[in-house]
Image (cartoon, helix red, strand yellow):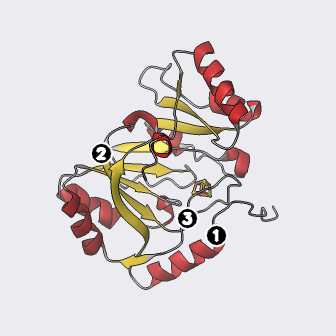
Amino acid sequence: MPLKVYRGETPDPRQATRDAVAVVRRGLLPIVEIFYSLQGEGVRTGQATVFVRVAGCSLACSFCDTDFRVRREMTVDEIVDEVIGYGCPWVCLTGGEPTLFDLQPLCDRLHAHSFFLQIETNGQHPRPSWRLDHITVSPKESEGGHLHPWYQDHAMEFKVVIDTPADLERARAYPAAGHPGGPLLYLQPNALNPDAVSLCIEAVKADPTRLRLSLQTHKLLQIR
Ligand code: SF4
C-alpha cells in the first residue's frame, strides 16, 4: 500500500519515529514531555495525572494535533524520578504511540513505586507483557490504522474520533459497555468539524446503554 501523504499540522511522524528509534538504539527512551495536569478525555476525565509523552507514531492522521518529536532522551530512572516529584498516583503513557518501544522496564519501575498506569494507544501493537491498570484504545481505522484483536478483549475503553457517519458505523462495531464486562465506548467528535458534535450527541441519545460522549475537556479549559 503506498504511504499516505501526511496532511496534519505537526511535523511528519515518520521522521519523528526515525529519530525516536535512533534514541532507543542508544539505550535511552525518546520522550517528548512529562507534565502534570488533569486527564481530559474518556472515563478518567477530571482525574489528576502525570503524562509521559513518548515520541514517534505508527500513523500519520490528517487531524493530528500532537507534536511527537523527540525533545528529551531519558533513562528509566530519570523518568521515574521526575514522575515521583509530582506526588500523583496516576501516570498516563501517551504519544505519539507509546507501544512502539519497549516500556516494560519503565512500567515495572513505576509499579514498584505503587503508581497506577494508564496507556493511550491506537491499538495496532499489543503489549500483553506490560502490567497496565487502564488501557484506552483510540483506533484510527479511517486513517489507515488497524485494531489488533488483542485489544478487543483487553481494552477498558475505546475512544473513537468521529468525523463522518462512516466513523460512527465503525465505532459501533467495537465491543462496549452494553456487553457484560465489556469496555466503555466513547465517541469523540473531531474538534475541527462542528457537524461531528451533533452527530455524536444524536448517536449517544439513540444508544444510551452503549455509547458516551467524550470531549477534550483540557482544550475547553485551555490547560494541557
Ligand atoms: S495515532 Fe494519534 S498521535 Fe499518531 S498520528 Fe494519529 S492522531 Fe497523531
Find residue 107 and report its horizontal and vertical position in percent. Answer: 31, 59
Label drawn at residue 120? none
Tell me the amino acid under the disc marked 3: Asp
Neighbours of disc 3 within 10 Å: few (<14), some (14-19), many (20+): some
**Quadrant location of residue 108?**
bottom left
Query: Of residues 141 and 95, which is closer to you in this image?
Result: 95
Is residue 181 at all visible to an observer of this figure? Answer: yes
Q: Secondary structure at mark 3?
A: loop
Dot 2 or dot 3: first in sequence order is 2
Kindly check if marks 2 and 1 are in contact, taking CB atoms under 8 A apart as contact. no
Tell me the amino acid under the disc marked 2: Ala
Q: Secondary structure at mark 1?
A: loop
Residue 83 placement, left or right of 73: left
Find residue 106 and report its horizontal and vertical position in percent. Answer: 31, 65
Q: Secondary structure at mark 2?
A: strand
Dot 2 or dot 1: first in sequence order is 1
Residue bearing mark 3: 67
Residue 47 placement, left or right of 214: left
Find residue 132 and report its horizontal and vertical position in percent. Answer: 34, 49
Find residue 149 and report its horizontal and vertical position in percent. Answer: 57, 43
Seen at 71% across and 29% down, the residue is 169
How far apart are the alpha carbons under marks 2 and 1? 29 Å
Neighbours of disc 2 within 10 Å: few (<14), some (14-19), many (20+): some
Kindly check if marks 3 and 1 are in contact, taking CB atoms under 8 A apart as contact. yes
Image: 194 above or below 60 = above
Residue bearing mark 2: 48
Tell me the amino acid under the disc marked 1: Pro
Seen at 63% across and 42% down, the residue is 191
Q: Quadrant of the N terminus?
A: bottom right
